[in-house]
Image (cartoon, coloured by chain):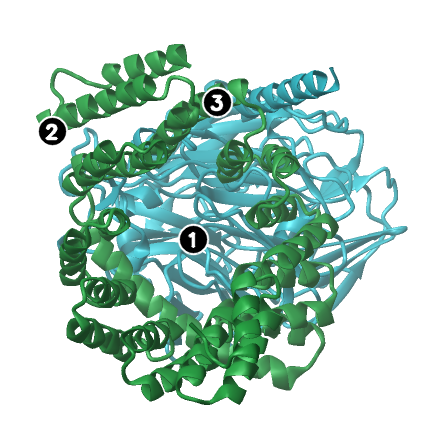
Chain colours: A cyan, B green
Amino acid sequence: MIRASFHRSILVTAIALLLSLSVAVVPARPGHAIEFQDVTEQTGIAFKHADGSSGRRYIVEAMSAGLALFDYDQDGDIDIYLVSGSALRGSQYSPPPRNRLYRNEGNWRFTDVTETSGLGDTGHGLAVTVGDYDNDGDRDVYITNFGPNALYRNNGDGTFTNVTKAAGVADGFKVGAGTNFLDIEGDGDLDLFVSSYIHFTYDNHVLGKARGYPAYVGPRVYNLTPDALYRNNGDGTFTDISLASGIAHSLGSGMGTVCADYDHDGDTDIFVANDNSPDFLFANNGAGLFTECGTLAGIAYDLYGNEMGSMGVDCADYDNDGHLDFYVTSYQDQMAHLYRNLGDGFFEDKTLASGAGAGTGGNVTWGNGFADFDHDGDRDLFVAVGHMDDNVAQWDQRTSYAAHNLVLMNIGNGRFVDISQDCGEGLKVAHSSRGCGLDDLDNDGDIDIVVLNTRSEPTILRNNSSSQGHWLQIRLRGTRTNRDGIGACVKLVAKDMSLIDEVHSGRGYQSHYGMRLHFGLGNHTKIDYVEVRWIGGKVEVFRNIEIDRLITLTEGDS
Amino acid sequence: MKFILAVLLVWSSTQTESTEDPQLKALRTQEQQLAQRLLRDFPESENPLVILGDFYQHRGQTDQALKLWQEVMKKDARRADVYDRMAKVAFATNDYEASTRLWRMALQMNPSLPNLYNNLARSLMQLGQYQEAQQLLEKEICLSGDNAANSLLLGAVHLELRQYEDAERCYQKMLELDPNNPHACYGLYQVYSRLKNREKAAVYLKQFQQGKSQWRTTKKETVVRNLSQADSEVNFYARCLARLCADARKLYMAKGDLQTTEWLLTQAIELDPNSVAHRDALMSFYADAGRVKEALEVCRVIKRMDPNNISCQLNLGLLAARLGQFAQAEKALLTAIAMAPAQADGYRELAQLYLRAKTRQVEARDLAAQAVKLQPVAGHYFLLGWACDVTGDRARALEALQHALILDPQNQAYQQVLQRITAEGTIP
């Protein structure tokens, strides 16, 4: 009798377990306020990304592209620039695809201003960054391509001029990847970092196979090309200092990049997410000389010493300890990785302990970003997801080409919780996503999201979170340093809360966003002070700051 | 069971399109016939569903695999091996809560399997539950001893828990087991960095970077080689089907159906002619069945396919010895020693060959001593005792046998021999 009942209970347990495996049950989560709504259709954005694919599976197709969120016309709202590939050998498009710029008209309406702006680059676009390289008060755009890259100078009247040749920043004919403007030596103007993926030409193309099916190959079969660094000469031209600066001494397969002062020594360092080779951390000596120290700092590999198929990278202080931590997305079967900055030049891999890898290992993860979506005083994570191979379902049922993106909520004790299935219909959209950008598109104080989907329309997600938390957005205006304060570090202190952030040009997966710094304040209604450390080391303290608004802090006005 | 398999067979047949490659079509027919045969020949057993699930899993058809394993569980909910399979799927799809639950069930069903402790620990680590992972890994080590895999995991657990001395101990153990292992070096680099021991950190960082650099070169070569040999859809299907045949033969072998066992193995080789594993299985089958000449023939084919295969080289020697071809056996075993001088196997087998042939007994003793030196296990001490005894070194023989008994105190054969040698002074 006892035996029979034991067997029955085992059977019941087993069946319950089987059901739990075959049916995705969303475990109950603590109540939270993060919610996103898909507003793509109402924006009027008709962009469709082209990857140039024709079935030949050139590796550059799978890279797809990033996007930029920035205020190109200085009208106070964030516009959207979407990067597209072009026809590769064997493919045809009519009309030819091009990058597209959409002006934000307010109220979630956007107008295609590609033609009038002159920003419709027709190269096989991969990445983009934004910065006012000529310090004339408007934001210029640099695009990396499979082929020569392009620099577009903003004329200040809503139009751009292609000045690549005159500036000397075409960077040869490479497979471009993440790119950033940064002031490497604190001379007040923005220099340019350009990573590159691999040495690929139509002639050295390799077709991969997965379980007998055609598939994209990884970067290992190709030779690597060094990344490049261009010094701004201050006269509209740049000088290639890749070798002299130490950048070109390291070879990796660069993808996403971010430039940030990881060691808090007052200059901007460079992080490169490398696909299938150790990630780079180029430490700046303050004079524009860089030493690659990723392995030494414990950020180039995972906990076990495995190099990852790194894709995108963002950095922010997720645990509010005053140091910038890094989040790196990666290939299928590898979790996206969170590296906690210990503040002594070293990082520890906190992926598992923090839960920041939750939901990321089942597919390829790309664009990513930290933002405090619910204004509770800590930064959450958004991750763009999608497989490279459109036929993956034929040979691997564990994953899919189109996938749902992820939201990982920071629950405040150094841990993240995957709430993707529980934060609105905006996260139920499935595409093969790549670059993403996080910014306040409707100027309501919270952070919205734009996702570039390969071979498809973008996804625009409006943040409808019901949080009652307060917030502050800060736009920096450099006078002696670069105009947008790129590289400046901001510390906000409100009673027991101390938050930091930095202004970055280029981040995530080959994208640019977030030049207006955003702080969630929780229930703090008063800010004690905001400290800005400009590039070059000058520190200013600003007081009497009101909350729940966007403010501009100008260098020298403290 | 019949119903679910019938459903899957219908599903499988729907994969056939009129435009399908005739080779693919033929393979699909072969798959269906084998599945039906398994079902017919093992009507009361759930094992055919288990191996058919494995087949689908290898093909990347995880959903089909899960359906079959779920069917098995309906019939027998105590199968730790099936829980393990399902947990692996959950783990691979990053459902760590499910993989943790399933491995817990597997352990409940069979707590004597060390790998289940390791798997559950890995799953718990993904959930950030390090304390329990640590306990499980320690249990695994109690059951199966230290190995590189559990030392690496336990090192990582201690590192995450900031127990740096413990982490150091684990990584050092790993280096003992696998000198220069880059993962252990990286672990030690992290430990010493956290302990601010810059000198030691620098040593292991250098070692790690050297190891990684070598690994990267080899990896690139492997990737390029694999790409050049990449399967077509037909070849991949055939390889999976070959594996199914090889798995199925175990069921027939257990049933004593030698004819079908042999047929399945030859089918596996026909479907996947480049597989050494299938030929190896056929060789073992012939050897076990006393068909030594045929076994030797297969072994020679393996040798041609994989000239650096040490185990094949040893088998050439052992099979030749069984056929009484002393010179060929000796030559093959000497070659095995030359191919892998740091492995004990060649020394052991050659020592046994000499001792059994009652020739070159002094050399046999030296070879046995070398085996003991390289791998001080009970069997090798016993062999040394035997060799010492026949060469008249009774004291050393006794000492070696006592060592063997210390390492394997329950071994009755050793006990009897020791008693006899103590009383009579000879080993039979």
Query: Which quadrant holds the C terminus of chain A?
Result: bottom right
| Amino acid on which disc 2 is placed | Gln
What residue would you read off at disc 1? A309
Distance in Å between CA atoms under marks 3 and 2: 31 Å
Chain under numbered label 1? A
Q: Secondary structure at mark 1?
A: loop
Q: Secondary structure at mark 2?
A: helix
Chain under numbered label 2? B
**Residue A200 numbered tag:** none
**Front position in the image: B48 or B325:** B325
State the image coordinates of residue B290 (x, y, percent, origin top left).
Answer: 23, 50
Query: Is disc 3 in the same subunit as disc 2?
Result: yes
Q: Nearer the viewer, mark 1 or mark 2?
A: 2
Distance in Å between CA atoms under marks 1 and 2: 36 Å
State the image coordinates of residue A337 (x, y, percent, origin top left).
Answer: 56, 52
What residue would you read off at disc 2? B23
Quarter of the figure with residue A543: bottom right
What residue would you read off at disc 3? B72
Tell me which label, 3 or 2, sits earlier in the chain: 2
**Front position in the image: B370 or B79:** B370
Query: From the viewer's perspective, is A123 left or right of B170?
Result: left
**Front position in the image: A232 or A212:** A212
State the image coordinates of residue B221 (x, y, percent, origin top left).
Answer: 26, 64
| Amino acid on which disc 3 is placed | Val
Q: Residue at x 26, y 73 (%)?
A: B336
**Front position in the image: A241 or B109:** B109
